[in-house]
Image (cartoon, coloured by chain):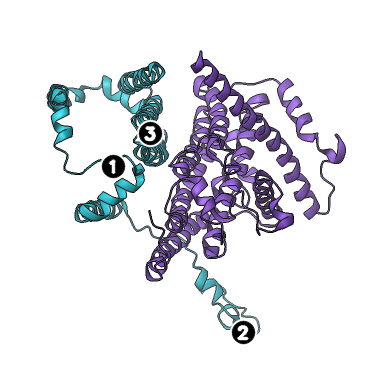
Chain colours: A purple, B cyan
Amino acid sequence: MAELFIFFDQIYRILFLLIPVLVSVAMIVWLDRRVWAFVQKRRGPNVVGPFGLFQTLADALKYIFKEIIIPASSNKVIFILAPIVTMTLALIAWAVIPFSETFVLADINVGILYLFAVSSLGVYGIIMGGWASNSKYPFLGAIRSAAQMVSYEVSIGVIIINVLLCVGSLNLSDIVLAQKDLWFVIPLFPMFIIFFISALAETNRPPFDLPEAEAELVAGYQTEYSGMMYAMFWLGEYANILLMCAMGSILFFGGWLSPIDLFPFNVIPAPVWLILKILFLFILFALIKAIVPRYRYDQLMKLGWKIFLPFSLIYVVLTASFLMYFDLLPGN
Amino acid sequence: MIAHAIVFYIFSLIAIVSAIMVTVSKNTVNSVFFLILDFISISCLFIMIGAEFLGMIMLIVYVGAVAVLFLFVVMMLNVAQQKNEWFNSSGRSSHIPVGLLVSIIIFFELIIVIGGWKYKPELLDSIAIEINTELTNTQSLGGVIYTDYIHLFQLSGMILLVAMIGAIVLTFRQRSGVKRQSYFKQISRDRKDGIELVDVENNKGVKIDA
């Protein structure tokens, strides 16, 4: 009986986390389109609901009622699995994100490795979708995206090592608490810039949206998808973007911590700060989408392997030497 | 405890079944997908015995990088087709002795491993390093690898480096006629390099592509 109680308690906690995440994904799509529109002096979605807030829900309804078309020559099992994999991976990563000192679903010791592992698995949804479609454009998109995501993962891994050197723990709560006095964005500012750009590439956002470059590949790996399956890809993509923003705010902006420990700021509950930081990073993502033209593929690879990787490796050595020389290495 | 056992058996069942499916399935791409499933369930088993660092590294390295490259190569080569042709051709019989030899060796190794299972308690006692349950996985691994075994660690790093250089040298080929871009060249260009003033003679014109 006790085990059953624990089981239902866990399910309740998971739903309490997942439903807000899904709702915020819907809202973030709206925000993305709004920011994009404002930069281009358009209005953006503003008809459905107040300020057009329910636009995404209307779109979702539209997708639900559309027919799902499965190409005759596709590998059906993998074709159907691909969006499910994308969506699941984008959602399970939220289990370790700490919203405050106590509010975290799974406070595991290797939290940051878990996040990194899940984000590196994200490429499977795209490869599976691209291959199973059995069509030229999706396959090209899948290959591009696999190469791109594997390349930029490497530099994200090295950037994480930089942060870990300053923290001395792989636990996400420890990473946040280590920034109590100084957010890592100040001493590790170059690493934050590289992390931000790598996150753009990792989530296939413009200017690195080559896997779905509409001018070259129709819609890349999503070309053959329709209806609810397309919507799942889409939701998973935006959930991944939110996750990357959350990762950035935990690694560099002190997660749930308030900027200064003074009266008007420290009464605001901790999760609000994390959400504000995620929103700040997301607005940066949306602005980049509006103002930067798309990269060429060879330039993208060159940037990843020849500039970001050596630079972040050198920064690891610098950080380690600095911490060693001034005796700032975190103790056990 | 019962729940623990049930979860353990579920994961091991998935691992074994998918390992069999890797060899049985006709389509090579499906084989790689089963291999990935196998890796994932094995990393879950690692996490269940408390080796969370190992489990996560397994996920990142094998599933996140190695298997992606496998998939990449298998999808590009369209091996499924080649394999079927190869099975029907006459050249298959020459490979059977080698395959048999390898499988016999693996079979005997498996017997030794399973037979050695009963020496496990003695083996655990003979471990030189004390197991400190206070420390996390990562700390204790780091404490051992970067202190007592630093030379072995660096040696394995060197071996990997040599293997990497070897792979690059083997596959590198200089192609002629490829137009390359150099940012530094492009940025350091000024008006003198880009523009040439020519006095054009009457009725002769200028030859541009010299």
Residue A319's spot in the image, x, y percent? 43, 65
Of A203 and B143, the residue lying toward us: B143
Task: Report which residue position mark 2 lands on.
Answer: B197
Residue A88's spot in the image, x, y percent? 55, 30
Q: Residues within 10 Å of mark 1 (few under 14, many from 20)?
A: few
Residue A185's spot in the image, x, y percent? 57, 61
Give, as a three-letter code, the residue at label 3. Val
Residues at marks 3 and 1, CA–CA distance in whole angstroms: 44 Å
Instruction: Identify the subunit bearing mark 2.
Output: B
Of B201 and A105, the residue lying toward us: A105
Query: Which is closer to the viewer, label 3 or label 1?
Result: 1
Task: Report which residue position mark 1 lands on.
Answer: B132
For the point 18% across and 33% down, the residue is B124
Q: Residues within 10 Å of mark 2 (few under 14, many from 20)?
A: few
Give, as a three-letter code, the residue at label 1. Asn
Instruction: Identify the subunit bearing mark 1.
Output: B
Q: Earlier in the sequence, mark 3 or mark 1?
A: 3
Task: For mark 2, give the secondary structure.
Answer: loop
Task: For mark 3, give the secondary structure.
Answer: helix
Task: Report which residue position mark 3 lands on.
Answer: B74
Q: Earlier in the sequence, mark 1 or mark 2?
A: 1
